[in-house]
Amino acid sequence: MLFSGEVRDNNKGRDVTHLEYEAYEPMANKMIDEIVDEAISRFKLNQAVCVHRLGRVEISGCAVVVITGAGHRKEAYEANSYIIDRVKNEVPIWKHEFFAD
């Protein structure tokens, strides 16, 4: 299962030009690795990976990717959702939106 989080060109009716993400990379990566390891155990995955970009990301660019593999697609889908939800809610990665106006 592959999830690719791509930058949208609008937010709440405003035109977005690009995003910038920042984080203390060693801490953010450690937290992401822990979430992925928990998902592997919890959902009995064969493999899983999550990578979140930092810095400037243009419109339609990929900001985050989650890949999960399991013997059954249900577990892979559930694990994928679990990972991205936890990363978005728990990992201290700050998103700065830049608008056309």
Image: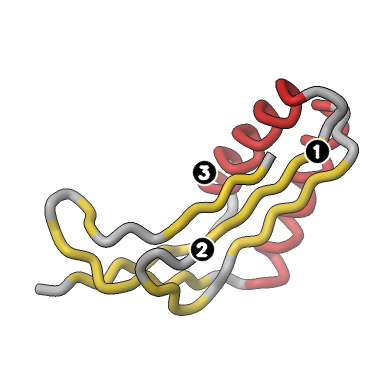
- Report the amino acid beneath label 1: Gly
Q: CA distance from mark 1 to mark 2?
A: 20 Å
The residue where tag 2 is placed is 62
Mark 3, residues whose alpha carbon is within 10 Å: few (<14), some, or many (≥20)? few
In x, y percent, where is residue 95?
41, 64
Q: How dense is the environment of label 1, judged by Cα within 10 Å: few (below 14), some, or many (20 and up)? A: many
Number of callouts = 3
Q: Nearer the viewer, residue 11 or 6?
A: 6
Figure quadrant of the C terminus: bottom left
> What colouring method underlies this structural image?
secondary structure
Q: Name the residue located 47 percent from the left edge and 70 percent from the top edge.
A: 21
Query: What kind of residue is marked 3?
Result: Asn
Mark 3 lies on residue:
89
* Crowd around label 2: few <14 · some 14–19 · many ≥20 (10 Å): some
Q: Is residue 27 above or below residue 70?
A: below
Q: Tell me what residue is drawn at x 22 percent, y 57 percent.
A: 10
Q: Is residue 69 above or below residue 6?
A: above
Callouts 1 and 2 close, C-beta under 8 Å: no
**Which image quadrant for residue 42?**
top right
User: Regarding mark 3 in the picture, which secondary structure is present there?
Assistant: helix
Earlier-in-chain disc, 1 versus 2: 2
Q: In the image as oriented, which residue stretches furthest toward the left? A: 101
Give the structural element (helix, strand or loop) at label 2.
strand
In the figure, 56 relative to 41: above or below?
A: below
